[in-house]
Image (spheres, grey):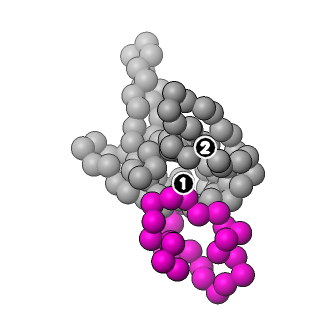
């Protein structure tokens, strides 16, 4: 269980087979909201849906039964379809267009 305290992601097959249930610390994606001035730290659990290479990082779209969210990380080895648990800070990027905000909530992995 010591590995579960690190900041890296965990692939669910590595913790299956035990009686361990990763539960109360995981936030359903639909409940993640960015609050001004606060950057909450959350754990999410879900499946890698998409992956996008960035300059020195990667963006992964993670989905659970409640929704989808993008996660920015230094990890380059997460494959589409992989089940993961990630820890990160909730962020919000405003995208104003014609007087409306089309911004998006995302997570930066710690």
Mark 1 falls on what kind of element? Answer: helix
- Residue most extreme to the bottom: 19
- Residue most extreme to the right: 81
**Of the pair 21 and 3, the residue shown nearer to us:** 3
- Total residue callouts: 2
Mark 2 falls on what kind of element? Answer: loop
Name the residue tied to disc 1.
29
Residue at x 60%, y 32% (from the top left corner): 53
Q: Nearer the viewer, mark 1 or mark 2?
A: 2
Taking 53 as reference, is 6 left or right?
Answer: left
Picture layout, residue 3 above or below residue 91: below
Name the residue tied to disc 2.
76
Q: Residues within 10 Å of mark 1 (few under 14, many from 20)?
A: many
| Rendered image quadrant of residue 98 | top left
Calculate the distance from the C-alpha at mark 1 to the C-alpha at mark 2: 22 Å
Work out whether residue 33 can be spotted. no
């Amino acid at each position: 269980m010591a590995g579960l305290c690190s900041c890296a992601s965990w692939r669910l097959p590595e913790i299956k087979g035990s009686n361990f249930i990763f539960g109360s610390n995981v936030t359903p994606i639909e409940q993640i909201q960015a609050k001004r001035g606060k950057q909450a730290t959350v754990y999410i659990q879900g499946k890698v849906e998409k992956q996008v290479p960035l300059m020195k990082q990667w963006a992964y779209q993670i989905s659970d039964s409640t929704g989808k969210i993008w996660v920015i990380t230094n990890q380059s080895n997460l494959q589409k379809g992989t089940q993961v648990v990630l820890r990160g800070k909730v962020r919000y990027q405003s995208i104003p267009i014609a007087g409306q905000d089309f911004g998006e909530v995302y997570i930066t992995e710690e």
